[in-house]
Image (cartoon, rainbow, N blue to C red):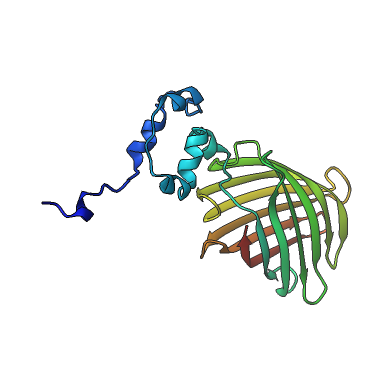
Amino acid sequence: MASPACSQEKPSFGIGDLASLAPLRSTPGSLTSDSSLLSQTSIDLDPKLIDSSPLLQRWLRQVPDVLDDIRRDPSFRTRLRVGYSQFPSTDQAGGWNVGVEDVFVGRSGITFSADYQASFNGDREAWGTDLRYYLRPLGSYINVAPVLGYRRLETTRYSTDGVNLGLRLLLVPSRTGAADISLTQSWVSPGGDEEVGLTTLSFGYAVTHNLRLSTDIQKQNARQRKDSRVGIALEWMF
């Protein structure tokens, strides 16, 4: 004879139960809610189980469009950065850099970025702000963004400031900030006598859930001379 403890059935919940909430068709874009199907489905679950499962509560309210969630959930995150810079073209001068990258404006694909960098000896300084508009869904592994902003550049040979216009290519081999590579080409005061081209290659790799290391290499091409910068930084991801 089974003991009373063994004879009591314990509620369980698994993938099969999720499937019973509403049939999912395999055609693209079909993972949407259907309240009539839920109302026709008899669900006998322990209320405590429902209260302890946000995922189950969400499915009971509305069957989500999973494919759309994946496409819209950003594959990269907002980062706050502080680090060290080396200026090889300026007698190997050392310096520092700070910045914030990709502050999202809702889920529109528009992000805001700002940065400041300078050498300790005062020979090099640069700062600016940019708006980026990612053309592909934010969850894509490959994305492209036009860049529009303002930038100020100062060296021992020249100084310039003005509109910063360019294009950014983003590759995300591992989502949600775990690893990414970006290449940005832009021009400060494009078309003018003081036009300066900026080419920036950046790498980022997470060491914890919220902290990661990043490096960037930048070429600064002006008519007066060509300059370079290499940076390494710690980034806190939000």
Kindly identify the residue that appears in the image at 68 percent across and 58 percent down: 218
Name the quadrant of the C terminus.
bottom right
- Is 53 left, or right, of 229 in this rendering? left
- Height in image: 224 above or below 145? below
- Is 218 left, or right, of 1 in this rendering? right
Camera-nearest residue between 117 and 80: 80
* Residue 211, x across and y down, in percent: 57, 64
Camera-nearest residue between 220 and 111: 111
The number of numbered discs placed on residues in the rendered structure image is 0
Kindly identify the residue that appears in the image at 56 percent across and 47 percent down: 75
Kindly identify the residue that appears in the image at 80 percent across and 68 percent down: 124
* Residue 236, x across and y down, in percent: 62, 63
- Height in image: 148 above or below 209? above
Quarter location, residue 231: bottom right
* Residue 119, x across and y down, in percent: 77, 72
Name the residue at the left extreme.
Answer: 1
Name the residue at the bottom extreme.
Answer: 121
Camera-nearest residue between 86 and 65: 65
Camera-nearest residue between 1 and 236: 1
* Residue 76, x across and y down, in percent: 58, 50
- Height in image: 105 above or below 100? above
- Is 9 left, or right, of 158 in this rendering? left
